[in-house]
Image (cartoon, rainbow, N blue to C red):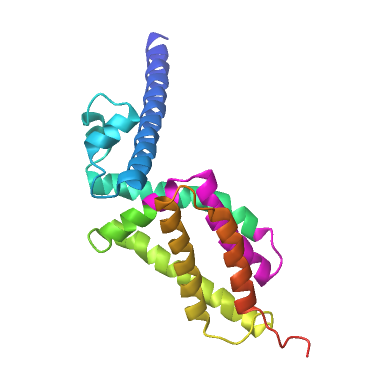
Amino acid sequence: MRARNSAAKQETEGASRTFTEAARRAQIVEAAIEVIAEVGYAKATFTRIAKRAGLSSTGMISYHFAGKDDLMREVVAEVFRVADGYMVPRIEAQTTAAGRLRAFIESNIELLGEFPKHLPAVVEVLGNVRGEDSTMREFCAAMDSLVDTHTHLIHEAQKTGEFGEFDPRVMALAIRGAIDGVVSRAAKDPDFDAVACGRELADLFERATRNDKRGE
């Protein structure tokens, strides 16, 4: 009986440690996102991140992460998780290619309002570590794959006649570049109205993609 109670106690304590460690990791990642967005990748030192997280030393970061690359991987993964959770339901709620394109652009930009540090942080990280680390290369490949997916979806909308005739990959790259440009501008200018810009971008690409000959 005593051994069983001891085992149960150890299991409870283990679960508590796991929860505490997960919460601490999340706290560090959140602090890293904020610091990177504010001062850039190069100046995002463990000292700055520890101070933002309210930690007494950088040792706690080193305990949870093998190094800066390891922490940056988790930063990118967290931003992707947040973005997917915010954007995907809005996109999937649409029933037309034009509606999904608008939802993709607007929700991407609106994400800045809900999580103002996340997108600038990931743009900063990916812009500085591309090609240096195998796992980060996987994230960069995922971004490239997203352009491939959009190219395919645009092409499919062209086949159904909803979108007009143009190079679908050029359009996908233009959309990605326009969104990244808004993110960079918003990161540098706190007075920039990113949401209004997102609506205007959606209007612009709606006009650029629609098939004006449809129904003739």
Q: Give the quadrant of residue 105.
A: bottom right
**In this picture, is 187 found above or below 145?**
above
Which quarter of the image is occupied by the C terminus? Answer: bottom right
Pinpoint residue 186: horizontal percent, then vertical percent. 45, 53
Over which residues does the magenta segment extend?
A: 92-121
User: Eyeballing the image, is 43 above or below 52?
Assistant: below
Residue under the image location 70 percent in, 84 percent down: 212
Say whether residue 58 is left or right of residue 164: left
Q: Could you tell whether 131 is left or right of 148 in the image? A: left
Position of residue 46 relative to residue 132, above or below, is above
Q: Quick check: is 114 in the magenta stretch?
A: yes
Which residue lies most toward the bottom here?
Answer: 216
Residue 75 horizontal/vertical position (percent): 36, 46
Q: Quadrant of residue 47?
A: top left
- Residue at x-position 34% and y-position 30%: 53
Pick the front one: 8 or 72: 72
